[in-house]
Amino acid sequence: MLTVQDLLGLRLGKLASAVDDWEVMARRLSELAAGGGGGDSAALLERKAELADWKGANATVGKAFVVKTASEFEDAVTSAQSVLAVLQGALKAFTRHKNEMERVADSAAKRNIRITPAGGAEARSPQDAAKDGAPTRMDLIATMRDATRVLQEADETDRIAERALRELARGKHDFSDVRVNSLDHAKSLQGRVDADRWAKEVAKGGVDGWSDEKLKNFNDTLGRYQDTPAFAERFATRLGAEGTLRFWRDLAAPAGTMGAVGPERAEILGDVQDNLSLTLAGATRVESPEMDAWKKDMIEAGGKRLPAAPGWGGGTPPFGFEVMTSLMHKGKFETKFLQDYGGKLLEHERKLPPFTSWGSENLNHPPGKSSCDPVSGLMESLSHNPEASLEFFHTGSGAESNWDYLVGHGEGSRNLRFTALDAVGLSDAGRGQYETSLGHALESAAIRTPYDADAPPKPHTDASASFVNRLVDHYGRNPEILEDSKLRGSMGNITAEYMRDFQDGLNGERPLTTHGSSANLGSLSETSVRDFLGAVGTDPGAYGAILNSQQSVTTQLVDETLQNPHGLARDTVNGDVNNKVAPGSEIAGIMAEARTRSVYDERIASDEEFNRSIDTAGKWAGRAISLGVSDIPYVNDVVGWIVEDTRESVVERYSKDNSEGAEQEREEFLAEQRRQSTGSTYDAVYSAARQHGYSHGEAVVVADSAQRSTKLHYEIARQDGGRAV
């Protein structure tokens, strides 16, 4: 295991010299093997041996020896070129690892952080930890994450290179005929070998008896090859579809235990479940006849109960869908497979009796970590493949049926199945788990990135924007569906992502530029848009995301206006600023009412939860800005001050004081929220005006005007009827 000091002190001169030497060696051996410069060669020797008139024993022994010797030169060239490829790859990779660690160390030093040999992070000294400018907890976590990542990558390079070189030097009496083209190629070759080895272990049976140590070794192998399709495809196809299902069923729910395992074993199994899910996801993306057959067989096995293993005590044997979907919570499964698999899964569930509750709890580890409902598992899988999710709900051939069954509440919908189960006390927490997973899938389809990925935002397409229009229309016309629903968190994230579209939809005939295609929310009734926002905003997480995004986008709109590229008169600019703050003010008013209803009226959340969400959802301030607008020349310093001001303003102005003696009545709280909202607008406009060269007095004038506009539209939002108020 390399340490940080090992990597920082790495001397690569000898490795570079070895690369030079092997380049010469490979070239010389190639000349000896194939000929060059008119000299003799192994190829010439082999041709002469084949043409010679051998007599007696030489016809068999002598000729074979000469031909074999000549062919060894070809293998020698292959080995030399393979060694060269491995050394070149190692030199390039270790140079990158060393440079990256130097950057991490330099950045840490500037923040008074010391990196430990194992990649940890701590303040340089107790004095540094206590004084102003000391590294924050987030600084330490970020440094540790970066240092650990680089160390792990360097260790992996070291492991692959060492194993490849040992394999190439394994033969005592002849050269290897295996060609290695690069470090990645070496890892693929090693992955196939390891996949075969573990597939043989599985084929022996008795996987439920694997020791914890053996299970950890298997899990380490899965983790090592997460990014190696060759391993994933080989392992999956060697097991086969039914073999894959049997393997996890027997491993997760050992025979004779009713599916119960100890807590330590459950933790290991949980890691295996995650890594096996990632492995199978990668396998489905490999194009090969064998993998095509595996996917087809897996879908066909879904509706059949898996035959019980001898002595299996886990109750009624699970359906194939239950086993496979428990292995689909992680990773990006191939789009067509998800469409075909998901369609058959829903078709199967629709045929089950109305009061059937399915899902094997003992297939998930640790118990309760993931939903045992296979449809929830499918939703989690869709949430990691945005293209597949959008196709499944909106653009694919079966999208209408999927929408009606999964999102709708009409006759034959899944929601009515939950209602039937509720009536006989069978649903338990199933509805909440399902709504959470469904929300993740809808969120992924709308924002075009996996719901839990820290990925840069993408421009909205016609398809994703029209999907958001459909969501807002559906839940805006039926806001009661979202009452105390787990869907609200994801709906809040979608709203934050599409904040420009929401403000555009509330801005009447004054269109705002959106990020990519517009969701065209102005085509819906304002009541539907407001009712959607009002219902979503009762969830603390959604409330925090929406407020941070709203404040950030409103500030950005004001900043764009105050750039005043056309030299408009100040009073004209002031009017434009008022128009830009108007829709954001309405949204702030709706959020205040939603929070009030949640805390004071329905009592489904606490002020502490709302305060916490305002802080933790701060990423949406930055994400809303990074969405940007392509034809506006924003630069990093402008983005920086908007994000910083937004986060500070939202936390300061929308967090409620819960200390003793700070209790407020409902109307007092709303009045205070109005004051804070108008004050937040004043801060944003004043800061933007000063950024663009306005004097203090001029900035006060435009900020005062915007503040009055905010108060007006805030009250409009509160008094305009509908569920939003």
Image: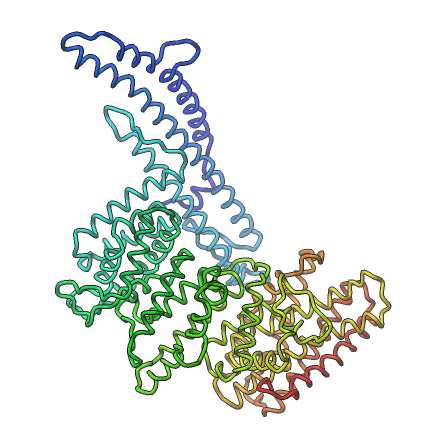
- The image shows residue 690 at horizontal and vertical percentages of 77, 66
Left or right placement of residue 359 versus residue 87 in this view: left
Left or right placement of residue 331 versus residue 311 in this view: right
Vertical order, 384 against 708 (above or below): above
Residue drawn at (28%, 45%) of the image: 194
Residue drawn at (42%, 9%) of the image: 38
- The image shows residue 616 at horizontal and vertical percentages of 53, 70
Residue 370 in sight here? no
- The image shows residue 41 at horizontal and vertical percentages of 35, 13
Query: Which quadrant would the N terminus be assigned to in this image?
Result: top left
- Report how many numbered discs are placed on residues in the image: 0
Residue drawn at (34%, 27%) of the image: 79
Q: Quadrant of residue 176?
A: top left
Q: Quadrant of residue 347?
A: bottom left
Q: Residue furthest left?
A: 311
Q: Quadrant of residue 417?
A: bottom left
